[in-house]
Amino acid sequence: MELDQLTDCYKAMADKTRLNILALLRHEELCVCELVDILKMTQPSISQHLRKLKQAKLVKERRNSQWIFYSIDGEIYPFIKSNLDALPDMSSKIEELKASGGKVCC
Amino acid sequence: MELDQLTDCYKAMADKTRLNILALLRHEELCVCELVDILKMTQPSISQHLRKLKQAKLVKERRNSQWIFYSIDGEIYPFIKSNLDALPDMSSKIEELKASGGKVCC
DNA sequence: TTAGTATATAACCATATGTTTATATAAAAT
DNA sequence: ATTTTATATAAACATATGGTTATATACTAA
């Protein structure tokens, strides 16, 4: 692949919050407010991280009424699967969200 | 894997010069002066990039008299092979180096 | 021991990045 | 229409990062 494209990809992954987001989206698509809930960060911060992931084509978005759901993309990167597989399991975080009723909004 | 370890790995890869270095080392081990020759950057700059790659355990070093040879490591990352495979072929750069006699030093 | 070559480190500076606060936009509900 | 909810964008600021120049270290050769 082109070095510039690869650099953009790794820049997008070179942040703990964004790796957290990717690790969460591996389980299921999530909207911004859910990520804010789980990661306990401000909404603008999460939104900007999502924008970087989207610009690198690592995630894609889908609007459903007032919510925007993000999910894993990365199909342009031949190595994406093995990289996602190395991310830690975050299913417990998603379980917590559901248990606390944080899933109501979506 | 641990998110912190993964973040360090992707930070190390999130720079075009360092991806260039990895792409070159994929072909064969090289010393600092050879990388300086090929990439046309200053020696301190190359040295500092190599240090970051080494700290992330993406390369290892081997001293041979006054030269220090760097080569690919990355064995702690289960995905390293697929990521290296996505790097562009740089064999022509190494051929140029050899043709121009830049290989004499090592 | 001295000079030369290869590499590393430190200090400095300019640019990039991540977070926060404030504001804008878009859709839903009333 | 107005208010509320979800999300995006902008401005401001502090920290991180990469490049340069200068200097230190390590090994070699004379």
Image (tube, coloured by chain):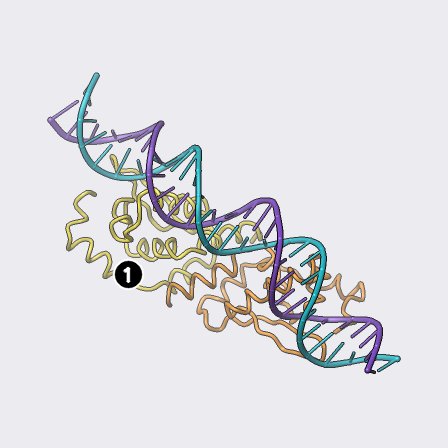
Chain colours: A orange, B yellow, C cyan, D purple
Residues D21 and B98: in front is: D21
- The quarter in which the N terminus of chain A is drawn is bottom left
Q: Is residue A31 visible?
A: no
Residue B72, percent from left and from top: 36, 51
Q: Position of residue A33 (x, y in %)?
A: 71, 66
Quadrant of the rendered structure where residue B88 is?
bottom left
Secondary structure at badge 1 equals loop
**In the image, A37: left or right of A17?**
right
The answer to whether residue A6 is seen in the rendering is yes
Please tell me which residue is depicted at 39% across the width and 60% down the height of the picture. Answer: B84
Q: How many marks?
A: 1
**Picture quadrant where residue A68 is located:** bottom right
Q: Which residue is mark 1?
A: B90
Rendered-image quadrant of the C terminus of chain A: bottom right
In the rendered view, tell whether residue A53 sits above or below residue A61: above
Q: Residue at x 76, y 69 (%)?
A: A103
